[in-house]
Amino acid sequence: MIPRYSRKEMTDIWEPHTKFRIWFEIEAHAASAMAELGTIPQEAADVIWEKGGKAEFNVERIDEIEREVKHDVIAFLTHLAEHVGDDARFVHQGLTSSDVLDTCFNVQLVRAADLLLADIDELLVVLKRRAIEHKDTVCVGRSHGIHAEPVTFGLKMASAYAEFDRAKKRLIAARAEIATCALSGAVGTFANIDPQVEVYVAEKLGLEAEPISTQVIPRDRHAMFFATLGVIASSVERVAVEVRHLQRTEVLEAEEYFSPGQKGSSAMPHKRNPILTENLTGLARLVRGYAFPAMENVALWHERDISHSSVERMIGPDATVTLDFALKRLTNVMDKLVIYPENCEKNMNKLGGLVHSQRVLLALTQAGVSREDSYRLVQRNAMKVWREGKDFLTELLADEEVRAALSESDLKEKFNLDYHTKHVDTIFKRVFG
C-alpha cells in the first residue's frame, strides 16, 4: 500500500491491529458457541471475552513470538493467552489456522467492498448530475477516433453512469460471493468441532456459513471478487481515457480542472496536462493485474496448501486500496470537469457537414437510388471535403446526379442537428428511470 494512493478508511481495514481484533472475535465467538453446546465451560468463554476484549494486542510482541514459532496464528494465540490466562486452553478448540485466516480475510474483503460500493454511489451521483447538465450539449461522436455523427455530452456521461451502475450490481454480487465463514477444522470435516459453531460465528460476523470447505474456503470465490474489481478498474480507465482524448489540444472539448497555482510542466509554463486521468489509467492497470494471481489461486493441492497465502496478503490490501483511491479520484475529476460547449460546436463543424453523410445516403435510397450508387454519390462528395476542404452541402447541391433525386430543400433538411438528438430523452429515461 503506497500512501500516495491510499485513503485511511480503506487502509485501516488492512492494518495488523484490525486483523488481530477480527481474529480475536472469531475465536471468542467460537468459544461462546462451544459454551452453548457444552463443549467448554461458560465461565471460560466469559473470561475469554472479558480479558481478550480489553486487550491491546501488541503487534511487536506477536511478531517477536512468530520469529520463534514461525507460525502467525500460533503467535497470536500465544499472545492472547498472555492476556486471558489459564482459560486460553479453551481457545481454538477444534479449529485450524485457515478457519481463522480465511474467515478474517473474507470479513476484510466485505468491509472493503462496502467502502467501494459507497465510492461508486458517490460517483453515480456526480455522473447523473453532469449528464443532466449537458443533456443537450451537442458534440461530435467518434468511431476509430474519427468524426462520425452527433451525440451529446450528456449521453457520454449517461453512458458512464450506466456502466458504473452495472459495476455496482457486480460488486454487490461479488460481496455476497465472498461473505462466507469456514470453521470446519482440519480438512473441512468438522471432526473436532460442531458445525453449529460455524453457523453461530458466521451470523455474528455478518457472513454465511460456507456450504462445503476443505481446509480452506474455495478460492473461486476470491477469483470472482478480484476479477470484479478488475472490471470496475477497466471502467475507471475507459472514462479516464475519454477525458484524456477530449483534453488534447486539437480537441479541447473538456479538461481536468486546473486549480490556481497549479503547474503543468517543470519546463513549459503553458502546459495543462491530464495528469489525474493519466494516473487513473496506471492505477487501473494495477487492479486488473491483481485479478490474474487470484485466478491462479483457485487450483490448490488437495484439501489445502498455502501457495495462495502470500498472494492474498498482497493483493487483498493493494487491490482494494488502489481501486478505492481511483474511484474517489475519478469522482473528483468528473465533479470538476470543465466542459467547453463552444469547442464542441467548433469541432462539430470542422469537417464541413460530413457528420450528416448517412442521412443523405438514406435519403437517396428512399428516393429510388440503389444503395451502391447512393454510397458512391455521397462518398465522392465527402472526399472533396476531406481533400480540398470543401463544404459538403455545397458540393451535394452542385452534383447533378444527387440533385436528380433530391431537391435543395430535401438536402438542406438532412443537415438539421436536431434529428440526431431526438431520442436523447428516451435514452435518459432508460438510464435514469
Image (spheres, helix red, strand yellow):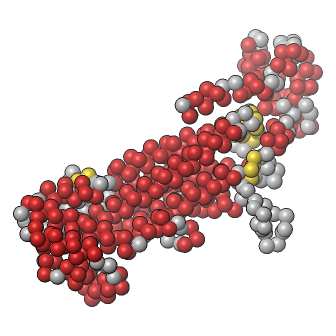
From what the image shows, is residue 125 above or below residue 302? above
Q: Quadrant of the C terminus?
A: top right
| Quarter of the figure with residue 135 | top right
Q: Position of residue 67 (x, y in %)?
A: 31, 87
| Quarter of the figure with residue 380 | top right
Q: Position of residue 32 (x, y in %)?
A: 16, 64
Direction from residue 374 to residue 109 in the image, left or right: left
- Looking at the image, which residue is at 16% across and 67% down? 31
- Looking at the image, which residue is at 22% across and 59% down? 201
- Looking at the image, which residue is at 63% across and 55% down? 332
From what the image shows, is residue 251 above or below residue 74? above
Front residue (pair 404, 416): 416
From what the image shows, is residue 77 above or below residue 406? below
- Looking at the image, which residue is at 82% across and 50% down? 250
Q: Position of residue 58 (x, y in %)?
A: 33, 82
Direction from residue 272 to residue 275 in the image, left or right: left
From what the image shows, is residue 71 above or below residue 352? below
Q: Position of residue 296 (x, y in %)?
A: 38, 61
Observer able to see residue 228: yes
Name of the residue lying farthest toward the left: 38
Direction from residue 235 to residue 220 in the image, left or right: left
| Quarter of the figure with residue 327 | bottom right
Front residue (pair 34, 418): 34
Q: How many marks?
A: 0
Observer able to see residue 376: no
